[in-house]
Image (tube, rainbow, N blue to C red):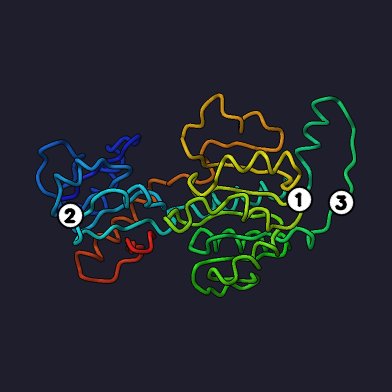
Amino acid sequence: MRITLYLTDNRPDPWIQGLQAELPDAIIEAWKPGAPQADHAVVWAPPQAFLDEQPALRGLFNIGAGVDALLKLKVPAHTRIVRLDDAGMSVQMAEYVCHTLIRHFREFDVYEADAAQGKWSYRKPKLRRDFPVGIMGLGVLGERVAKAVAQFEFPVLGWSRSPKQIDGVQVFSGQAQFDEFLSSTRVLVNLLPLTEATRGILNRDTLAKLKPEAYLISIARGGHLVEADLIPMLDAGQLAGATLDVFQAEPLAADHAFWRHPKITVTPHASARTLREESISQIAAKIRAMEQGLPVAGVVDPARGY
């Protein structure tokens, strides 16, 4: 069995060493033009030229949860695209969302601003029941985030394409229940996969349906947000604020207005990073299952986009 790696912006050597320890009988190499045909590939943001030279791939294993970049490429019909189920990302997402939610709810950002001026201030406590948190996307990551938020006794809502059942979460599904989900939400967390159906889903129309003074936490893909719609809504008071981790173009340009807006917190696509050791173990297990003809979790349906 031969495995090839194409990892844009990632050193391949640690991945090769880890995979070799898990799959000692495999030939594992970083891809170079003209390389022999491989059975499987481990990739991050490969170019079309890579796939054109590797038409025999049976498995294409993405080291991140999002596969929207791969779906833009011409992938052979027989090649199965496989995403990571978690690889340590869900707990990081939960940390990020809970930190951001509590910082906003407890107004720690206001305390920080006052402290910088040497000002001793007091904020009236708010009620959690007034801050229902809506999670868009209830896959592995979304479910973990929803359960973590529920531990802090906020009302938690979830919305997904198909019906789900999660203890402690009021779940909505499908387009028919989307508006009801939005109107019941005050803090909106986006964890949807990026597909043609979800591109631009965070826009003036949808955000206007949230409860008054709503707060946006955008951590899935930059393509979900219509960036031009956000600042006018913040300036008009329709939204109380936003924390953004993903953007249409990354890195975010130094002159982008999001950096300087007082109601926007920017982080550099840092809400969750792939943990290499966990990812290697999971990819190796999926490759073994595929080689043995067993079911493989995380196989992407190109028609759905995830």
State the residue at coordinates (64%, 55%): 188
Sequence-earlier tag: 3 or 2: 2
Residue 75: horizontal and vertical position, in percent?
23, 53
Element type where label 3 sits in the image = loop
Sequence-earlier tag: 1 or 2: 2
- Count up the numbered dots: 3
State the residue at coordinates (65%, 71%): 168
Foreground disc of the pair 1, 2: 1
Foreground disc of the pair 1, 3: 1
Q: Identify the amino acid type marked 2.
A: Leu
The crowding category of the residue bearing disc 1, from other C-alpha atoms within 10 Å (few below 14, some 14 to 19, many at least 20), is some
Residue 217 or residue 290, whichever sits in front? 217
Q: Height in image: 61 above or below 155?
A: above
Question: Which mark identifies residue 57?
Answer: 2
Question: Which mark identifies residue 83?
Answer: none
Residue 109: horizontal and vertical position, in percent?
75, 38
Which image quadrant for residue 108?
top right
Question: Which mark identifies residue 213?
Answer: 1
Cα distance between the residues tagged 1 and 3: 16 Å
Q: Identify the amino acid type marked 1.
A: Glu
Residue where numbered disc 3 is placed: 125
Sequence-earlier tag: 1 or 3: 3
State the residue at coordinates (51%, 32%): 252
Q: Identify the amino acid type marked 3.
A: Pro
The crowding category of the residue bearing disc 2, from other C-alpha atoms within 10 Å (few below 14, some 14 to 19, many at least 20), is many
